[in-house]
Amino acid sequence: MPTLVPSNEDVRVYEVAVAISPVLDQKEEANLLKEIDAHFAEAQAKLLFKDPWSKRGLAYKIGGFDQAKFIIYYMEMPPEKIRELDHQLRLTKGILRHLIVIPPNGYEAVSYEDKYQQWLKTRETQADVRHREKEEKLKKSVTDQAKRASKRMTETRPKQKETAKPMEAEKLTAELDKLISDADLKL
C-alpha cells in the first residue's frame, strides 16, 4: 500500500470519503462515479489510491437511508481547489455525505475493505461462541456421566461364578429321569 507523500510543495494529499446511495443500480452508480472522477479532474486532483467499500450501516439515517456505499479516495491536489471540490460534491445528486481530511504525515493507505472481507470470513459471532461453548459443556457432561456409569457397573457387577463342568451323558440322563418320574407327579 502506498505511503501518502505529496509529489511537490504546491500540492497536498487529501483523504476524501464519499457515501453514496445504496439503491442505485449499476448503471446509475457507474455514472455517479464518473461524475465524481470528473469533479476530481476539474480540481486538478491526482488519484493515489482508491478503496471502494461494500454497503455499511450508518449510525443514523441520512436522506432516509440507514445504509450507504462508501468510497475512500486518496488524492493529491492543490489546496486552493478544495473549496470548489467540496461545493461540487455537495451538489452532486446521489452523494449522501462526503468528508475531506488531510491525513497525517507518513500515513499509509490501506484497503480496509479487504481486511473487512477477511474478518467476515473468519469471525465468530457471540451466538456462535455461546452455541459452541454449550456443545462442549454438554459433550463433557455426557462423557463424565458415561465414565461414572461404567465405573459403577464394574464395582457392582457380581463376580462371575465358576462355570460348572459339563455332566457326563449317563449322569445327566439319570438326573432328568429322577426329576420327571411318575412317582413324584402323583398321577
Image (cartoon, rainbow, N blue to C red):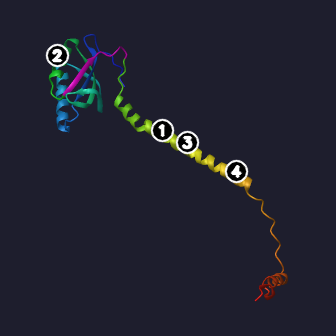
Q: Position of residue 112 (x, y in %)?
A: 35, 28
Residue on which the image places disc 2: 84
Amino acid type, callout 2: Glu
Residue at image coords 27%, 29%: 70
Amino acid type, callout 1: Arg
Q: Which of marks 3 and 1 precedes in the sequence?
A: 1
Taking depth in this image into account, of 181 and 60 the one nearest to the observer is 181
- Single out the mark in the foreground, 1 or 4: 4
Amino acid type, callout 3: Lys
Quarter-of-image position of residue 44: top left
- Report the Cα–Cα distance between label 1 and label 4: 32 Å
Q: Which of marks 3 and 2 precedes in the sequence?
A: 2
Tell me, yes or no, whether the highlighted magenta stretch contains residue 15: no
Residue on which the image places disc 1: 130
Residue at image coords 61%, 48%: 143
Residue on which the image places disc 3: 137
Which span of residues is magenta-colored? 95-106
- Report the Cα–Cα distance between label 4 and label 2: 83 Å
Q: Which of marks 4 and 3 precedes in the sequence?
A: 3
Q: Position of residue 3 (x, y in %)?
A: 36, 20
Q: Which of marks 4 and 1 precedes in the sequence?
A: 1
